Amino acid sequence: MSEVPGLQEDCEELLGAFQAADTVRFERFAELWRERRFHTIYYGRIRALERNKITKKTLELAQQYFLPPYAFQIRVGALYLLYGLYNTQLCQPKQKIRIALKDWPEIQRFQQDLIDSQHYDAAYVFRTLRLARAFHFTAMPKPLNYRTKKKIQENEFKEEFKDPSNRVNSLITNDVLEELMNVHEHYQKMKCVISADKLQPDKALSLIKDEFVVTLKDVTLEHQEWQQNRMKLFLNAKETNEMSNKKKEETLLQSEGAERASALARIKYKSYSAVAEASRSRRHRQVKLESSESGLNYGKSPSRDKKATRRPQPARRRDSLE
Amino acid sequence: QESHAVGKRPDNPADLVGEGELLLTLNIFYPVIFQKHKDHKPYQTVLVLGSQKLTELRDSISCVSDLQIGGEFSSQPDQAPEHISKDLYKSAFFYFEGIFYNDKRYPECRDLSRTIIEWSESHDRGYGNLQSVKMEEYTFNDLSFKIGFPYLFCHQGNCEHIIIITDIRLIHHGDCLDRSLYPLLIKKHWLCTRKCFVCKMYTARWVTNKDSLAPEDPCFFCDVCFRMLHYDAEGNKLGEFLAYPYVDPGIFN
């Protein structure tokens, strides 16, 4: 079945509003839901077969926001969204929410977090869904589809919804630091044992900086703070830009993923924009430049023109990238 | 999708599906008979429980080739035998991940996979160890397979169906919990039935070749039209033709 148009945008809009409200209370979410009359999202397809499909697609989309790497607030919002969507669906018997078994421990940890941080309304909502037997425990999160001709669409979710991807933190965790500390102490003790002075290792044996574990910890914390500040800056800039010139500021303060992507695009453009002009003897076989950016051109080879045409200069595009 | 069995509970409590039972969704594709099906093969969707034996699935697959009656009967149209191919050729196998599961419940069953195994072992063709085991000794829980990967079901010697497992999940309170209803058919492709050339009303039951009385070769007739055209009042054969009993693929609609 083809993608349901607008579904992702609607869900992201609601979750975005919830995130902006800066709370995890269900009352706030319910207000936002009622403002938008979100239950009408199912009214698009009324006939039985299509109704089942659209409900499945909607629940599948909402379920994705419920799992990591999304931020805590977005995940709570997704939980409320699932609750709302599950209860307002038109299908009888109700379509269930598919959760892969591999994600289940993560969800249980999430529930424990909710209870520990005393977000009892979210914990209650989750418990209600469990009691209503709203979940199907599956092996794979997404059911298969057979239209091999269709391109598998990569879902690009908004950067703001994600927890800042802290790769450094995930490598240097508390456990790792503790382990390092233990090993370091053990190493120092071994050095003392084989030295002449039993209380201090020999000068000849000092090959590493003694304080390196502490330094490592400080550096990691610094990195985390820097990243958080950057994120805040990006979000602030985005807000103030709603009125002013969008394009200019966006190119200045792009998030890291988009920066990398645009750098790659620049390099690619430079290397592929130079098309060799054929010699005069083969001037009936000039190569025309075709862009591979639009998905519709997939698989087409560059066209050959009988006349010796000059290749078009894409001057417009050059400006916007630099 | 037929949801006639959703939420059903068994009359016999021994038939109740237990908690923690796995539910698999399989797509069984029809063999390509009509050329128009080559790109989008029609299929039926079946639900099976993890604890069911492979033989239960084999028995539930309804294929038109099982109902074929072999033989030419132009001279004795009333004596078409009752033995359908399903009774005569009982061998079948499933192929999952390098292992052939052969149906060995009846003495007539032969190991159809032996030819394939011998072929792959004769030269170094790059296939790993292919094994052959008995279908009736295995349940779906014992198998290992990939979701979405095509596997094979072969019966009647050369009738091959592709099987793809699309989904595995735990049994749910809202599912049909009556074990006797599984394997459960939930989706079937509807095939057009071929009608008699003469009356265009009844489904064809006979097909003729080299028929001097028929406008095309092969030509399909229902029972009544067939006899009226090809035999006189005493039952003598008129004209030259070869006649075979015909089973339409749409018989399972």
Image (spheres, coloured by chain):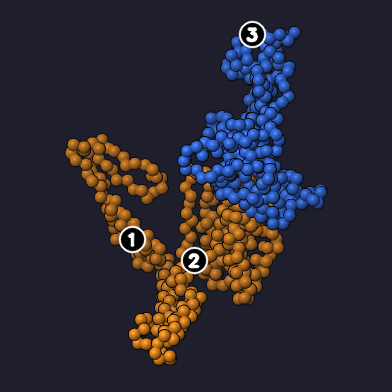
Chain colours: A orange, B blue
The amino acid type found where label 1 is placed reads: Ala
Q: Does residue A317 show up?
A: no
Residue A190 relative to residue B185: left or right: left
Q: Is residue A176 above or below residue A57?
A: below
Co-location on one chain, circles 2 and 3: no
Quarter where residue A316 is shown: bottom left
Q: For mark 2, does the 10 Å Cα neighbourhood hold few (<14), some (14 to 19), or many (20 or more) residues?
A: some
Q: Which residue is mark 2?
A: A162
Q: Where's residue B29, x and y in %?
A: 59, 38
Q: Position of residue B30 (x, y in %)?
A: 60, 35
Q: State the SS at label 2.
A: loop
Residue identified by numbered label 3: B239
Label 2 marks which chain's residue? A
- The residue at 65%/48% (across/down) is B140
* Residue at (69% x, 57% y) in the render: B20
Is residue A212 shown above or below A86? below
Q: Secondary structure at mark 1?
A: helix
Q: Quadrant of residue B56?
A: top right
Residue at mark 2 to residue at mark 3: CA–CA distance: 81 Å
CA gap, disc 2 to disc 1? Answer: 22 Å
Seen in the image, is B204 located left or right of residue A290? right
Packing grade of label 1 (10 A; few <14, some 14-19, many >=20) is: few
Residue A263 numbered tag: 1
